[in-house]
Image (cartoon, rainbow, N blue to C red):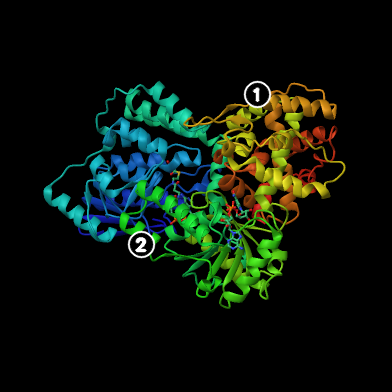
Amino acid sequence: MTDAITYERIGDIAVLKAQNPPVNALGVDVRRGLLAGIEQAEADGVKAVLIYGDGRTYFAGADIREFGKTPLEPYLPDLCNRIEASPLIVVSAMHGTALGGGLEIALSSHYRVAVPSARMGLPEVNLGLMPGAGGTQRLPRLTGVEAAIGIITSGRQVDATEALELGVVDKITEGDPREIGLAYVKELLDAGVVRRATGELPLASGVDFDAEYDRVLKKGRGQLSPAVAVRGIQAAVEADSFLAGMKRERELFMELMETDQRQGLIHAFFSERAVSKLPELKGVESRALNAMGVIGGGTMGAGIATAALLANLPVVLIEMTGEATAMARGRIEGNLEGALKRGKISQEKYDHLTGEALVLSTDYAALSDVDLVVEAVFESMDVKRDVFGKLDAHCKPGAVLASNTSYLDVDEIAAATSRPQDVVGLHFFSPAHIMKLLEVVVAKETSPETLATGFALGKLLKKVAVRSGICDGFIGNRIMNAYRRAAEYMVLDGASPYQVDKVVTGFGFPMGPFAMGDLAGLDINWAARKRRAPTRDARERVPMFYEMLCEGGDFGQKTGKGFYIYEEGKRGGVPNPAVAELIAKDQAQQGVTARDFSDEEVLRRYMCAMVNEAAKVVGEGIAQRSLDVDMVMLFGYGFPRFFGGPLKWADIQGLEAVLADIKSYARADDFFWAPAPLLEQLVAEGKSFDDLNKG
Ligand code: 3HC
Ligand code: NAI
């Protein structure tokens, strides 16, 4: 036995308890312990074996930290087969989350009991993998092929009730896993049941696997693992024997293990968890968060208020006039109606949230009891300073005063108060009740408690909170401005906006930069460009077709026309022919001779601009770690998760090659393409961006 698995004999039953906190991942010690436990039980002459997990869960899967390293015996599929082959009656009692290799151990057991709150699934595709220890072979034998395809290719978790209906568990009982497991084993022994091996169950299917493969591949927008998993299930149906199916599953699993996508998705998994763990916040208590204020009930204020209400945080929202408060209420109610329609909240909850939980006022005195305020008024320093002066006068001592500004200097905003230590930036993304990203912007005097409270709010609202320093656009918008600029340069030089958008969506983004501009409103970026124009460096190339489009009153979707033309009732837009004329005019005025761009070059320039700016953001300390940048781009800008983020993508490409490309682009424009010093340093030292995450 190992420390990770304890063995205990109770009469005719051997009890194997897993204790590998926090989630009983199936690391090598756990696998060795299970194997030894089964062997010991057989040697001891018991009749049955009970397997369960100590602590918060049954096994939550293979140990992800072992992936990419040399595998150590016993391998998980062999262990599963060994458990299934045991002549004893093997029973698993599940609680918490039985996932991946964990569920595969359960499926290899002969009988399964679960507590009502247990959840189970095969989420390997979310890590760029597929079940690799019999999941694709055994699950369809219990649920049928179609249900197994649904569960495995989505990676979704199934609750105990659905698992019972599908035949994944045999019984649901309230209690702790040890008690319910022992009771169930006794019941089975009393009933004289025989060993029942999932792998020996018959399996037939009329599914067209090629069609399923194509359907799943298309749905994955470039992600391979769900489609490859279909081939594993196909092998369960078509292979000559169960073991031949297992062999095929293993081959496919190992192929996926070698992919870049596996690296990217596992990087995303760990980074998502690491991003909110800041060394500077160790031991720092956040302040109480029982009520929140929101200033401004426009697009963002209404979305932020909705997010807070959905997290059961009562909201006091301040607007300028009675009419504006009514409009703000309308927006919030509209958002909550959406949640009601999607079954996310009940009618009763809706009534409560739009009733007593939401107070709208034009009087700042209504904020006297709130613990945190998020300001989301017009993007103007004068207006924001005025608002913060009022917040200073009306909010209780210790209340956190936050700004949702996209670009303005939070230090300057903080200086409008007598308590800059309580001021922080909380940059939400639109729509704020849906988008997962929250940039927590630290100003010079922001106290650790204030920062901790910003992160606590992020957690409460189920957001991915990322720490950012102050600069124009913080982490995300600053990087976006760089790659959007690269896209505009390519268009000025001869690529079409539609080619760029197509290449970018082909890479895995939900939208390209021009369609995205249309969606966000071209006027917003236009205003920022005008604001920056007076301080622009003389060496900067300035494409003007964007300005020309805006000058004509075309702001994108909101005006029905931008880079695309949008027709009422139709999804998406068609290219706006006027745009080509504006580009040609811009080229003529700037003396640019248009040239063709290959799709490869479009992608490379777009990505290199993103990586170079991201490296500057990390190098300047605006982001503390490269993983912070990666999570911002994943959760706020639609960067495809299977590449892990721009800096993980760059690591996978090889930093030397990325830097070489940047330098080659710099030959024509050494201002925009000036290589990031950090990138040059990493290349010189033979290091990767990921190395910076480990420091
Ligand atoms: N391996 C290694 N570490 C794991 C892990 C795993 N399978 N699952 C979770 N952890 C770690 C987390 O990284 C985290 O570590 P940290 O405290 O150092 O940050 C800690 O366990 C707790 O995890 P969470 O913060 O995520 O805890 P939650 O309670 O929010 O969620 C969970 C628990 C639902 C189990 C979630 O962690 C999860 O989804 N884990 C991944 C499950 C999974 O993908 N399993 C399949 C693995 S692949 C496989 O099994 C291949 C097989 O088919 C051969
Ligand atoms: P908006 O124009 O839709 O809403 C602003 C609201 O603030 C209006 O309803 C206005 O009546 C109200 N307001 C103005 N001055 C006020 C005052 N003194 N007191 C109370 N209410 C006041 O603007 P939007 O888009 O919601 O943006 C708000 C802030 O959020 C800006 O700073 C913007 O940069 C930022 N932001 C915007 C994003 C977006 O996608 N729209 C994304 C992230 C941040």
Picture residue at 44% right of the left edge, 51% below the top: 335
Judge whether residue 371 can be spotted in this image: yes
- Return the mark for residue 352: 2
Q: Nearer the viewer, mark 2 or mark 1?
A: 1
> In the picture, residue 647 is in which quadrant?
top right
x and y percent of residue 47 in the render? 21, 50
Q: Could you classify mark 1 by the number of other residues whose Cα lies within 10 Å: few (under 14), some (14-19), or many (20 or more)?
A: few
Front residue (pair 85, 62): 62
First in residue order: circle 2 vs circle 1:
2
Amino acid type of the residue tagged 1 in the rendering: Pro
Q: How many marks?
A: 2
Amino acid type of the residue tagged 2 in the rendering: His
- Return the mark for residue 577: 1
| Left or right of 204 on screen, residue 66 | right
x and y percent of residue 100 in the render? 40, 44
| Left or right of 413 on screen, residue 502 | left
x and y percent of residue 257 in the render? 52, 36
Front residue (pair 419, 125): 419
The C terminus: image quadrant? bottom right
Judging from the image, what secondary structure is the residue with disc 2 in?
Answer: helix
* Label 2, ligand 2: CB separation under 8 Å: no
| Left or right of 501 on screen, residue 301 | left
Front residue (pair 81, 420): 420
The N terminus: image quadrant? bottom left
Judge whether residue 134 can be spotted in this image: no
